[in-house]
Amino acid sequence: MQNDNVKFRIEFNKRLINFSLAVIRLCNEIRKDRNLWAVADQLIRSATSIGANIIEARASSSKLDYLKFFQISLKSANETQYWLILTKESCPSLRAQADKILSECEEISKIIGAGVLTMKGKR
């Protein structure tokens, strides 16, 4: 069981990194429109915060601290979804790319949300 948890954590961390990289590539395209520079900046901040907080949770000093990092990560994932929706609505040429990343973000949110519920003893 322990080995499965370690494997999942490693694979999930890789998934979070790949997600962040996909967002960065999307933002390189978004930045071609000067009016959307602020959107690109916010999207990168929120998207990279998801993985950063999951990684940071490992150094937590308590279970409550650990849970708080996961909750922050979940909030960042929700914010990222907002910026991705805004991107796809304002940049029709990037809609397919944004939709793919949005789908991944929704899956990541569900995984983190399930973890938060488990840690709170509600699952």
Image (spheres, rainbow, N blue to C red):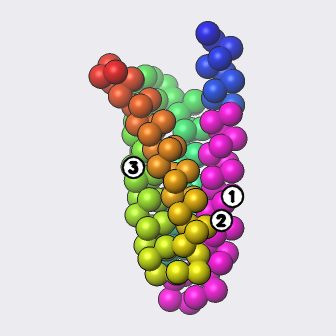
With respect to residue 10, does 84 lie above or below? below
Could you tell me how far apart the alpha carbons at marks 3 and 2 are, in whole angstroms?
Answer: 19 Å
- Residue at 61 percent of width and 19 percent of height: 5
Residue farthest to the bottom, as pictured = 34
Q: Secondary structure at mark 3?
A: helix
Kindly identify which residue carries mark 2: 24
- Evaluate if marks 3 and 2 touch, with contact meaning CB atoms under 8 Å apart: no
Q: Please name the residue shown 44% across and 59% down the image.
A: 81
Query: Does residue 122 appear in the picture of this structure?
Result: yes
Tag 2–tag 1 contact (CB < 8 Å):
yes
Q: Earlier in the sequence, mark 3 or mark 1?
A: 1
- Going by the image, does 109 lie left or right of 56? left
Q: Residue at x 57, y 30 (%)?
A: 59
Please name the amino acid that badge 3 sits on: Lys
Q: Where's residue 31, x and y in %?
A: 61, 81
Question: Residue 77: horizontal and vertical position, in percent?
Answer: 46, 51
Q: What's the magenta region?
A: 11-37
**Secondary structure under badge 1?**
helix
Residue sticking out furthest to the front: 96
Residue under numbered circle 1: 21
